[in-house]
């Protein structure tokens, strides 16, 4: 007689659950991106236009940074930028910082052409009109902050050894003291983190700060990864706005850009003397939607990760979280030449910037 083992039944159930979860979460991602991205002609949000302006302004500033400028340049991004600016002017939304920066970049391009005595083809006059109108209504900041600048190729002043020591002194801390985090310190760290790179300088990041103990408890309950540890004084939710992106091949770019930002932010918070633990946002769509509602987030914002934030206890323990050797990371046709680097990057001990970090021996960590 045909019999099905209990392991077989369990495997079928696991198979079905896996495919159900993968399908529903993928469809949710699809729906969010389709409703947010600006390449979909049905979308025309304020954030869409800001994303487009960032991309076109970035193309222009890249053009400006060529050592040997090929005049005239920037016709297409300039024309695209004008199309978006016209919509902004209709919507009366010229007051946004990003609009100001895009306009100032356009102005730099117009001025650069004038300096070379070259007539910008096509829409230069219209851009100039828009510039005049918007610059009259709001100064977008000194033009020197946009466009291009010359940097020294001399890297001697950069202390890479100190950087390596600093990066290695950061650990995910789960033992928080009751000391209050000063909002100014968070602002300071965010001011550093916005220097993270992002595709076409889109800067899609948002940081939602939860400070109320009840909100933090609720969010941590939904997240689940800090169970059994101290509740931090703040919980940051790092998000990236998918409305700043366009074509379907960019659909994971918000997570890439947001992840780079989150890493810099964590390092900047560490530099401010704070303790952090990144927490994943690998949650079912229904839970992510609950977080959106709790924090009043825009549906186009994708949650990249959470950051538990506070000050460390005087003495605290962290898991060893051993790292794989560099030799297993670097891949290429030849490994010759990397050997020395492997030796040089051997673990440097466990000193943190606040003194030695007591480490939990393998097996004791949670
Ligand atoms: C995206 C992301 C999600 C994480 N999620 C959790 C989590 O849910 N709970 C937790 O205790 N640690 C979490 N961590 C911390 C990792 O466990 C930790 O970074 C890793 O073990 C390396 O240790 P270190 O941060 O001390 O160097 C997360 C880290 C990242 C980057």
Image (tube, rainbow, N blue to C red):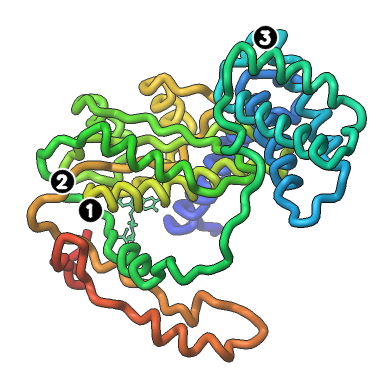
Label at residue 176: 2
Dot 3 or dot 1: first in sequence order is 3
| Residue visible at 50% across and 43% down in the picture | 258
| Residue visible at 46% across and 78% down in the picture | 326
Label at residue 217: none
In the image, is 302 to the left or to the right of 158?
Answer: right
Does the CB distance between marks 3 and 2 fall below 8 Å? no
Label at residue 91: 3
- Please identify the quarter of the rendering in which residue 160 is found: bottom left
Q: Position of residue 179 (x, y in %)?
A: 11, 39
Q: Is residue 37 visible?
A: no
Does the CB distance between marks 2 and 1 fall below 8 Å? yes
Answer above or below: position of 70 versus 33: below
Task: Tell us which disc is closer to us: 3 or 1.
Answer: 3
The quarter of the rendered structure image containing the C terminus is bottom left
Q: Secondary structure at mark 3?
A: helix
CA distance for labels 3 and 2: 47 Å
Frontmost residue, 255 versus 169: 169
Frontmost residue, 284 versus 190: 190
CA distance for labels 2 and 1: 7 Å
Residue closest to the far left: 314
Label at residue 173: 1
Q: Secondary structure at mark 1?
A: loop
Dot 3 or dot 2: first in sequence order is 3
- Please identify the quarter of the rendering in which residue 50 is found: top right
The quarter of the rendered structure image containing the N terminus is bottom right
Mark 1 close to ligand 1, CB under 8 Å? yes
Frontmost residue, 119 versus 316: 119
Task: Tell us which disc is closer to us: 3 or 2.
Answer: 3
| Residue visible at 54% across and 77% down in the picture | 330
Does the CB distance between marks 3 and 1 fall below 8 Å? no
């Amino acid at each position: 007689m045909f019999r099905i083992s209990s392991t077989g039944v369990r495997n079928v159930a696991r198979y079905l659950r896996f495919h159900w979860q993968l399908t529903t979460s993928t469809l949710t991602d699809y729906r969010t991106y389709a409703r947010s991205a600006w390449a979909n002609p049905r979308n025309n949000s304020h954030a869409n236009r800001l994303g487009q302006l960032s991309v076109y302004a970035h193309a222009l500033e890249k053009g400006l940074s060529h050592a040997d400028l090929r005049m005239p340049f920037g016709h297409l991004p300039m024309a695209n930028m004008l199309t978006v600016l016209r919509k902004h002017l209709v919507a009366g939304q010229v007051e946004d910082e990003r609009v100001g920066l895009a306009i100032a970049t356009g102005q730099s391009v117009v001025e650069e052409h004038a300096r070379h005595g070259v007539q910008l083809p096509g829409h230069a006059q219209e851009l100039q009109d828009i510039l005049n109108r918007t610059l009259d209504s709001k100064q977008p900041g000194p033009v020197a902050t946009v466009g291009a600048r010359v940097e020294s190729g001399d890297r001697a002043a950069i202390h890479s050894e100190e950087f390596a020591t600093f990066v290695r002194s950061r650990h995910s801390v789960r033992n928080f003291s009751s000391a209050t985090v000063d909002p100014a310190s968070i602002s300071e760290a965010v001011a550093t983190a916005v220097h993270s790179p992002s595709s076409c300088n889109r800067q899609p990041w948002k940081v939602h700060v939860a400070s109320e103990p009840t909100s933090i408890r609720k969010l941590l309950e939904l997240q689940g990864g800090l169970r059994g540890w101290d509740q931090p004084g703040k919980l940051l939710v790092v998000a990236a706005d998918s409305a700043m992106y366009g074509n379907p091949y960019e659909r994971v770019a918000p997570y890439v850009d947001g992840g780079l930002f989150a890493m810099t932010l964590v390092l900047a918070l560490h530099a401010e003397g704070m303790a952090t633990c990144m927490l994943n946002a690998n949650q079912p769509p229904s839970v992510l939607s609950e977080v959106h509602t709790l924090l009043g987030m825009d549906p186009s914002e994708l949650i990249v990760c959470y950051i538990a934030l506070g000050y460390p206890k005087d003495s605290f323990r962290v898991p060893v979280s051993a790292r794989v050797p560099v030799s297993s990371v670097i891949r290429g046709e030849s490994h010759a030449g990397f050997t020395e680097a492997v030796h040089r990057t051997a673990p440097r001990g466990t000193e943190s910037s606040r003194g030695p970090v007591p480490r939990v021996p393998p097996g004791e960590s949670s």
